[in-house]
Image: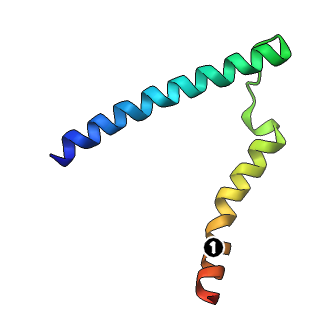
Amino acid sequence: MDVGVGIILAIISYVVYGFGYAFIRTFHHAMLGTDSTARNVFGHPPVVMAIAFCLLNPFFEELVVRAY
């Protein structure tokens, strides 16, 4: 039963992701008048900062958990 629920949850997640992706692209196009042309992911500071955050966050989270 858990496998069936997991598959349904995965399908629903992909559908919701698709709607979110379409909304963000439409909003971006409405605000700037062009589609996103970014191809070099690592050339953008927010992406680099997000990667650094994902790598450093567990370390600081463990510090907080162990301290309290």
In the rendered image, the residue lying farthest to the top is: 33
Q: Amino acid at mark 1?
A: Glu
Q: Residue at x 69, y 65 (%)?
A: 56
Q: Nearer the viewer, residue 5 or 37?
A: 5
Q: Residue at x 51, y 24 (%)?
A: 18
Image position of 31 (left or right of 26): right
Picture quadrant where residue 63 is located: bottom right
Q: Nearer the viewer, residue 8 or 55?
A: 8
Image position of 23 (left or right of 49): left
The location of residue 41, given as percent across then percent down, is 73, 34
The location of residue 25, given as percent across then percent down, is 68, 20
Q: Nearer the viewer, residue 51 or 35?
A: 35
Picture quadrant where residue 15 is located: top left
Under tag 1, what secondary structure? helix
The location of residue 38, given as percent across then percent down, is 76, 24
Q: Is residue 12 visible?
A: yes
Question: Height in image: 45 above or below 58?
Answer: above
The location of residue 21, given as percent across then percent down, is 59, 25
The residue at which mark 1 appears reads as 61
Q: Is residue 36 visible?
A: no
